[in-house]
Image (cartoon, coloured by chain):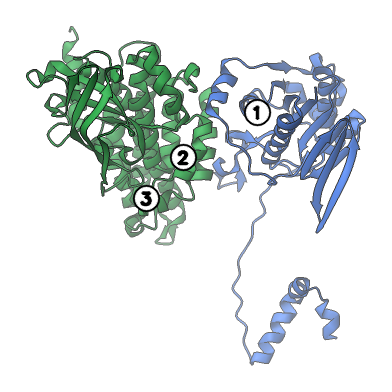
Amino acid sequence: MLKLVVCIKQVPMVSELPWDPAKGTLQRDLAEGMMNPACRSALDTALRIKETAGGKITAITMGPPMAEEVLREAIALGADRGVLLSDRKMAGADTSVTSYTLARAIEKACPGFDLVLCGFSTSDSETAQVGPQLAEELDIPGVAYVDEIEISGHTVRMRRFTDNFLETLEMDLPGLVTVNAGRYAPRHVPLGGLQAAFDGADIVSLNAAEIGLDPERIGAKGSATKILNVYSPTAGKKNIVLTGAPKRIVEQIFERFDDKIGGAIGKDLKTERK
Amino acid sequence: MKHKVVRKAVRMFAEAELGPIAHDIDRDARFPLEVVEKMMPLHFFGLQAPKAYGGAEMDTISYAIVIEEISRVSAAVGLCLTVHNSVGIYPIVRFGTEEQKNRFLPAMARGERIGAFCLTEANAGSDAGGVETVALRDDRDYVINGTKIFVTNGGVCGTALIFAITDTQNPQRSAGVFIVEKENPGFAVGEIEDLCGMRANPVSSLFLEDCRVPETNMLGRPGDGIKIGLATLDAGRLGIAAQALGLAQAAFEDSVRYSKERQQFRKPISSFQTIQNYLADMATEIDAGRLLLYRACAVKDAGRPFGAEAAMAKLYCSELATRVTNTAVQIHGGYGYSKEYDVERYFRDAKVTEIYEGTSEVQRMVISRAVLAQRT
């Protein structure tokens, strides 16, 4: 029986996020949460494995108590159990500390796991670091940006599309993969499953002490990186009127934009013009 | 937490699957079978049907949220669901025999057979006692003759509940409800109505001409018709209230967005107090309607009589939907009157929520009866 672990993060639903026009920032504290799209693809991949090869899926998430929502959703979609890692002491974790926390929790809650699946990245921070770091923390092989996966015995065969290449890789289990978003249209949540996931689902909540984490290595305190500033880049618009004879106008266009035009056609126009 | 997750799951479905086509299916008056087929395995057609018959067995607030969220994107599809679930399935769950439940519910809960409830006739609507369709006993069958009009889901229904009298000498006391399937000989679908709104729903007339059904297709006993009809409409009203609320919510959200984008006098129109007052009133009414609806749903789930609460929710939500969608068109100005903007569709869709499943006038009758029956 394959033991699959899917790491899921609840991220702010940006489309629903109120914008603070005075500060020019998203009001994250008012955000509704949703399952990170790439995590949804990771769960989808695990469900496909379960449907063809059998197995049990544990969905695991770290976050505020509200993150339980994504575990219920995962169970409604077909996961067998949920593990919620929630503790104020874990708050403010950077990617390295998150990986440490997840690794110890997976060892604790899912001993003997075969395959850990993560989304390749999360839509709220986009570092794409937790998956590979988690493989290091668990001391297992890991492959990032996977599109397709097949399991036979204790080997996984994976395909990924990168830079116009199609790579096929093999890995022995236990191992970890991070899954690209968008390979398959994510399945919709069945309402009967959702009702059942709330009527009675196997969800455990673990705090830092229960996982047995080193208090010095978790949360903001244990994190080596600090977020100094979060801001939204703004794009400005400016009208430019080019005057002169047509030849002069074309020259002006190249003077202003030759790096961009050159980039588009793959030539260094500055050197060519000289 | 459950209700929030249900809302998000349905919103995601509706925006992904119905969002891109909602405008076109209204324009073309097309029932979106391709989306309905995606809804089937997700239990949209068995929202409150018991698990034993393949339903999701959701609570009534969850049910209302599902209808709200689907209607927020396409009220015509929301209409299909609310009619199917509340006045198609609910009476069979509540009044059906075990044999009837086993025979009809699983296919309905899967959505393979879409339900319709047929009370309205040329001379009967608000006055249920005016029904002229007759079902006369012939040995162990009933033979039904009559014409039903304005049947929601009429063009696609697989299973229709037909309201008919069984004794022409005593129409009021002999009314019965018959489960008729589209394969029954003598059952025919009329032309699809050309309506102001809800155009993606194939509302039609149904013809019953010597339509023969076994006596085991009668819900309850002869004479139970009025009782079943009224109880069914109580449940149906919650769904219509939810549908109206979804429409109002959509119109409100579009208005907020548009008022921030639209510039007049070099300012977004949301900076003008008149528009702010419109938005404040819309938000307040929608919130009040939602609380009224969820209260009625909670009373139903607690197993207490909920007829007056359902009538209040239906009355208030349908009327607020008409007001809110009207204001939404006003905020959008000329664009709001154009089919290019969704508020034009919401405006057309909203009006009928004041008419079907009991007009506003009938709701006030139901409410005032309950009020006057109370001891003071």
A105 left or right of B164? right
Helix or strand or loop: what does disc 2 sit on? helix
In this view of the protein, can residue B358 be seen by the observer?
no
B145 left or right of B21? left
Residues at marks 3 and 1, CA–CA distance in whole angstroms: 34 Å
Residue at 40% across / 20% down in the picture?
A: B103
Q: Give the percent coordinates (x, y) of residue A267.
A: 82, 76
Q: Nearer the viewer, residue A182 or A138?
A: A182
Helix or strand or loop: what does disc 1 sit on? helix
Marks 3/1 same chain: no
Q: Give the percent coordinates (x, y) of residue B112.
A: 44, 33
Q: Residues within 10 Å of mark 3 (few under 14, many from 20)?
A: many
Residue at 31% across / 32% down in the picture?
A: B317
Q: Which residue is mark 1?
A: A74
Name the outermost residue toward the front: B139
B203 left or right of B98? left
The disc label shown at residue B26, or none: 3
Q: Amino acid at mark 3?
A: Asp
Chain that bears disc 3 = B
Chain letter, blue in picture: A
Residue at 57% across / 24% down in the picture?
A: A193
In the image, which is nearer the foreground, mark 3 or mark 2?
Answer: 2
Chain letter, green in picture: B
Q: Residues within 10 Å of mark 1 (few under 14, many from 20)?
A: many
Q: Nearer the viewer, residue B31 or A32?
A: B31
A101 left or right of B345? right
Q: Which residue is mark 2?
A: B36
Marks 3/2 same chain: yes
